[in-house]
């Protein structure tokens, strides 16, 4: 095998200076933003920067090209200011395909645009993870940081997570209070400065309550655990939802709302005979929910149904809600409630023997009288 004896082309001082200014002296790898002009411990002045090539300066290098490599070897549009770790990461052999030319160019553009706008690295790029876990069928669920990072890619999780673990709390009201305390401390008072990613493996009422506690003014994207691949990465496609409205001749003080997604609510186990509304997957089952777009579609249809019920029955109506739903939808059920507008919503679940649905909690109490 021939040895490549070429020396890396010298990058002119003017180009290096211009790149440092564009990058604000920080690593341009998305989510890093590390200061490169001082030691991280002592704050003594030091140059920790690497100048990385997007398209390698040599054809045989990472993302190299016969024509473009020599043309762009010292071109600032092809250079990124990075910390040593991320320079090594993007040029490591097993990562070349993952960190493509277009992806690195996108990182560079995002970072330099944000520096130019004097806003620092965009706060919505590193997402802050929320974990909610409860015992499910006697088992304690596990969510690993690696699974979360893989699900968020090409975005990145912040190092500090908000972990809400109620596995050792048996009482529902106590669990709700614990969730509320965590939300109040870490989320609600952030003044909208964060973008959150929620990973939930918990009982339906707890997922609903987390969404309700956070509310609809905080940006949260939820993720779904896929049993077949044992990961949390959203996919493309998936089925659609059908909405059915009750045929009414006059307003009612109570209505039923059935949500059939991961399964179908057994109407024979419902003891009340109220006007019925429903949101249903076209093919209910555990594998129905595949994409984030489906969650957004549900969010809109759910909001429409709540508005329709209020319009047809008035603000004093009570909604009896029966969910057969996966965790991201549970979260949306709570988060989608407008606390100053919507009527009272009572949540139901099957008894342990599966013989009847019972009221498990008041998800929302009507505020306006």
Image (cartoon, grey):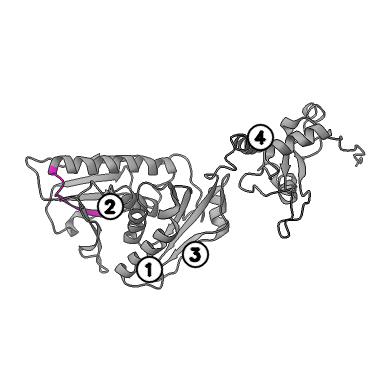
Label 1, residues with CA under 10 Å away: few <14, some 14-19, many ≥20: few
Give the CA separation, mark 2 to mark 4: 47 Å
Q: Earlier in the sequence, mark 4 or mark 3?
A: 4
- Residue 298: where, in percent of width, then height? 34, 43
Q: Is residue 97 magenta?
A: no
Q: Nearer the viewer, residue 130 or 244?
A: 130
Instruction: Decide if residue 130 is on the left or right side of residue 276.
Output: right
Q: Earlier in the sequence, mark 1 or mark 3?
A: 1
Give the CA separation, mark 1 to mark 3: 14 Å
Instruction: Residue at 74% x, 55% y: name it.
Output: 39
Q: Which residue is mark 3?
A: 142
* Disc 4, SS: helix
Instruction: Decide if residue 179 is on the left or right side of residue 79.
Output: left
Label 3, residues with CA under 10 Å away: few <14, some 14-19, many ≥20: few
Instruction: Decide if residue 11 is on the left or right side of residue 347.
Output: right
* Disc 3, SS: loop
- Residue 368: where, in percent of width, then height? 18, 50
Q: Earlier in the sequence, mark 4 or mark 1?
A: 4
Q: Nearer the viewer, residue 190 or 278?
A: 190
**Snapshot quadrant of residue 27:** top right
Q: Which residue is mark 4?
A: 105
Q: Is residue 319 magenta?
A: yes
Q: Earlier in the sequence, mark 2 or mark 4?
A: 4
Label 2, residues with CA under 10 Å away: few <14, some 14-19, many ≥20: some
Q: Which mark is residue 137?
A: 1
Q: Which mark is residue 264?
A: 2
Q: Report the magenta residues as a range.
A: 313-324
């Amino acid at each position: 095998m021939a040895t490549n004896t070429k020396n890396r082309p010298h990058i002119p001082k003017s180009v290096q200076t211009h790149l440092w200014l564009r990058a604000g002296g920080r690593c341009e790898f998305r989510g890093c933003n590390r200061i490169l002009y001082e030691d991280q411990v002592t704050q003594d002045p030091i140059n920790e920067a690497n100048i990385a090539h997007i398209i390698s300066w040599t054809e045989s290098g990472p993302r190299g090209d016969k024509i473009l490599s020599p043309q762009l070897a010292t071109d600032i549009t092809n250079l990124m200011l990075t910390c040593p770790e991320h320079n090594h990461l993007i040029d490591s052999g097993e990562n070349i395909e993952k960190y493509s030319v277009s992806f690195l160019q996108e990182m560079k553009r995002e970072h330099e645009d944000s520096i130019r706008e004097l806003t620092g690295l965009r706060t919505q790029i590193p997402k802050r993870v929320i974990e909610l876990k409860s015992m499910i069928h006697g088992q304690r669920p596990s969510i690993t940081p690696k699974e979360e990072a893989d699900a968020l890619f090409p975005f990145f999780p912040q190092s500090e997570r908000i972990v809400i673990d109620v596995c050792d709390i048996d009482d529902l009201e106590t669990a709700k209070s614990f969730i509320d305390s965590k939300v109040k401390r870490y989320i609600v008072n952030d003044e909208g400065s964060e973008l959150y990613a929620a990973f939930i493996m918990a009982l339906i009422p707890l997922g609903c309550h987390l969404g309700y506690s956070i509310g609809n003014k905080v940006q949260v994207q939820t993720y779904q655990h896929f049993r077949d691949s044992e990961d949390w990465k959203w996919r493309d496609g998936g089925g659609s939802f059908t909405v059915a409205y009750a045929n009414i001749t006059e307003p009612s003080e109570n209505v039923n709302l059935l949500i059939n997604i991961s399964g179908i609510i057994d109407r024979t186990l419902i003891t009340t005979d109220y006007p019925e509304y429903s949101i249903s997957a076209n093919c209910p089952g555990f594998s129905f929910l595949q994409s984030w777009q489906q969650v957004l579609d549900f969010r809109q249809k759910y909001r429409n149904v709540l508005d329709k019920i209020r319009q047809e029955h008035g603000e004093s109506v009570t909604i009896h809600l029966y969910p057969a739903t996966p965790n991201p939808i549970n979260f949306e059920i709570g988060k989608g409630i407008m606390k100053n507008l919507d009527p009272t919503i009572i949540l139901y679940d099957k008894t342990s023997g599966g013989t009847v649905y019972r009221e498990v909690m008041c998800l929302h109490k009507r505020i306006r009288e």
